[in-house]
Image (tube, coloured by chain):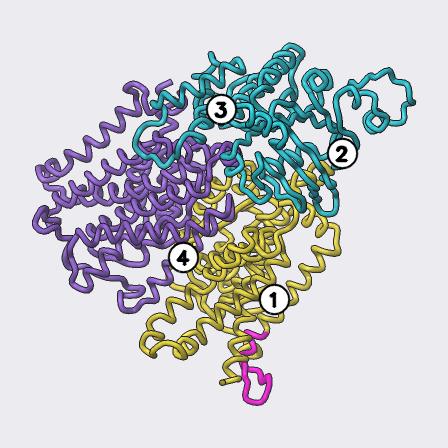
Chain colours: A cyan, B purple, C yellow
Amino acid sequence: MPETQIDSKIEPLIAVRGLCKSFDGIIATDHLDLTVRRGEIHAVIGPNGAGKTTLINQISGILRADAGTISLAGHDITAMAPHGRSRLGLARSFQITSIFSDFSVLENVALCVQAQRGHSYRFWRPAAAESALNAGALEALERVGLAQRGGDNAGHMSHGEHRQLEIAMALATNPSALLLDEPMAGMGRQESIRMVEIIRALRADHGILLIEHDMDAVFALADRITVLVHGRAIASGPPDEIRTDREVERAYLGDAGPDRGGQADG
Amino acid sequence: MTMSLRSPVSLRSAVTLGGLAAFAILPPLAELFDQPYYLDIAMRMMCLAIAAVSLNLILGFGGMVSFGHAAFIGIGAYAVGIPAYYGEYSGFIQIPLAMGAAGLFALITGAVCLRTRGVYFIMITLAFAQMAFFALVSIEEYGGDDGLIIETRSEFAGLIDLEQPASLYYLILVALIGSLYLVRRIVASRFGRVIRCTKSNDERAQAIGFDTYRYRLICYVISGALCGLAGALLGNFTGFISPDMMDWTRSGELIFMVVLGGAGSLFGPVLGAATFLILEEVLSSWTLHWQVIFGPLLILMVLYGRGGIDGFLRSRHA
Amino acid sequence: MDWTLLVIQMLNGLQLGVLLFLLAAGLTLVFGIMDFINLAHGSLYMVGAYFCATIADISGSFLLGVLAALPLTFAVGLAVELLVVRKLYARDHLDHVLATFGLILFFDAATQLIWGPEGISIALPAFLDGRVSLAPGIEFPTYRLVIIMVGLTVAASLAYVVSATRIGALIRAGAANRRMLGALGVDVNRLFTVVFAAGATLAGLAGLMMAPITEAYVGMGNSILIVTLVVIIIGGIGSVRGAFIAALLVGMIDTMGRAFLDSAMKLVLSAQNAETAAPALSAMLIYILMAVILAVRPQGLFAPKGR
């Protein structure tokens, strides 16, 4: 419906305002403002230690911010527990693979579906027999290309498959907003290309905050890029702007001179 | 599939069914060979097995290492003993009271304990159990240190007469089978899946939308109530109810039973309880100071045998 | 208001607190640095008491018993660490709990096997056995005063070691971030062994100091271990300062509670109700305190940063 579509374009899906976080005097997030809209991929890049994962941890609720507000689809979630944020439509993938390694691949994803479908105060019927959960899980697995691995133990997979599972789990909770923390971490060329396609296909239905070091992927996917240094956004805008921004060059490459021809591969 | 709840007949299933069958035919055999002593041991085994099954629910499947589970046994036993002291012998009152009181204690202490993790959780459960222990010891009215003797077992309006050893025996056996079945269903259900995933990765469980604190608390309460039932049955069996039933060394023994049998397996706790009692019997027939042998045995088990009996059986099957 | 009684009970509370600190310090350091739950800490308390009692009995001198028991307890601590504990650092807490539970059973049974089921009493030398007059009308047992002074001295020494020496710096670093220690080239194994054995010795000291009052008996360490656990939970695992403050707090509240709760309750309840409820409630006091503190600060009062 036209009205809702326009609404969702005006009201950001994720809105971070004035976010601050420090650890024992070291500033990890410095008065950060950031928005993510539905249908866009907003990439956050920056040198190591810039505070990117800390940012995602605050948005997903693992860390409590010292100051500032976070809102999701208009709801103030600044003080909300992680599970509450998930219920409101926020999902994340983890930089270091964080799955249920004692379960099968299908069960991992089925759990995510289960979390969003009704309550789990059911003590009698076997969950593995619920076809709706399995169907939802299979669908998510298909989107990332892991459908044939459903019966395998999730702990015994290759690194690339783990990263795919991470995405599948994030998708299976049927979120509107996705936080992807270095989905391509440790992946080879082929796998990265595949992952880019998977993420690109997600753009239409979600608002995505993407943290990545792989610059090819970032520039291929991002609608907007924010550059984070020492917890502060030093630049924010469309990829072309960022590519030629002096401040960004200096942050990433050091004082290496003005004319670099737009080379932004970190 | 990683959970072998639906695996075909295996060595483990054979042991399970064989074990239950052995318990079932023991009373007539004991009568035949005039060895009532074995009935006594088996009853104690089954009561402790129910307690171990309840602990396994939170420990084996949920990863919550409670070092205070004996408190629930004691509460369940006193829920039989205290009404009996006042002349109330109805099992219809005592048994629900046992499970309710134990469940309530689990709710109140669990609400605090489950806010903590790991080391803290273990120590706090231990501390709360001690609190219950001291509370009961200081009530002179109910025997204090010396405990209570109950003259009459729970009465069920004539439906069954627990004064007959065989009746009590089969009641306990039914309770054991019921507990095993209940835990089996819970573990496979949606609820059980959530509990198991909190053991595997609590942070991720929360991230996907589960209020893990609430689920674990409910699980803790179920476990406590079930253990209270074990206490009520044990109290009926021994006829003597003392705070020693809730001593923390009892809690340690329960953990041992669960781990020895195989934490996170369904029948493991029963095997663990049986093995522990047999060990205790055998070792104490050699020496009064049997724990001088048992202690190091326990250490060796921890160092070299962590899968427990169930793990051993699995490896045989593979 | 009976001021004499109040002062005496406060001193008793201080004495208990100091004793708890000796136990808690070793326990919290072992937890904090090695992440190891040692339930058998109470057994070392017992071992110290028994060594002292035996040597005092043989030699006729309590002081000789004290001096000999300390290195002997240290040796037992060393043995336990090298033979059992060391193999378990990499394991999870459940394994620690079970294994040290096995150690408790072993120590209790072995002690009974060697020394028999009867407790052993220790006679104090005359100069320790009297009473001291602290103020007109207030007399306090000399020995308990000595315990307080020894305990406070040890606490001060420990504070000095932890804050001003190299090994203390290693300890504080280890409590905050264990992995870094190895990366910095510290002989982590040796550090662990020393910390464990030192903690055992402190426990033994506590045990032998209490032995003249309570007798040395089998299982004497078990109930005080649990109170010690409450202390380090309240104080924050890994913090010696937290252990000190929590120990004094718990010692005071427990002692004063047992002494004055029924009188306090009689102000609001009938005498009969107060008399029934007070013993149970005063036994539960420190656990209620623990629950309240945890509700507000789940990590304890002074948990070291980085946990």
Question: How many numbered discs?
Answer: 4
* Residue C142 inside the magenta-drawn segment: yes
Q: Which mark is residue A172?
A: 3
The residue tagged 2 is A233
Q: Which residues are magenta?
A: C130-145
Co-location on one chain, circles 3 and 2: yes
Name the amino acid, label 4: Gln
Which chain letter matches label 1?
A: C
Pointer 1: residues within 10 angstroms few (<14), some, or many (20+)? many
The answer to which of C283 and B239 lies nearer the viewer is C283
Which chain does the numbered disc 2 sit on? A
Chain ID of residue with mark 4: B
From the viewer's perspective, tell me whether residue C248 is left or right of residue B82.
right
For label 2, the crowd category at 10 Å Cα-Cα, with few meaning under 14, some 14 to 19 and many 20 or more, is: many
- Which residue type carries mark 1? Gly
Residue B210 image position (x, y, % from top left): 46, 36
Q: Which quadrant does the C terminus of chain C fall into?
A: top right
Mark in front: 1 vs 4: 4
User: What residue is shown with label 1?
Assistant: C151
Residue B130: mark in rendering: 4
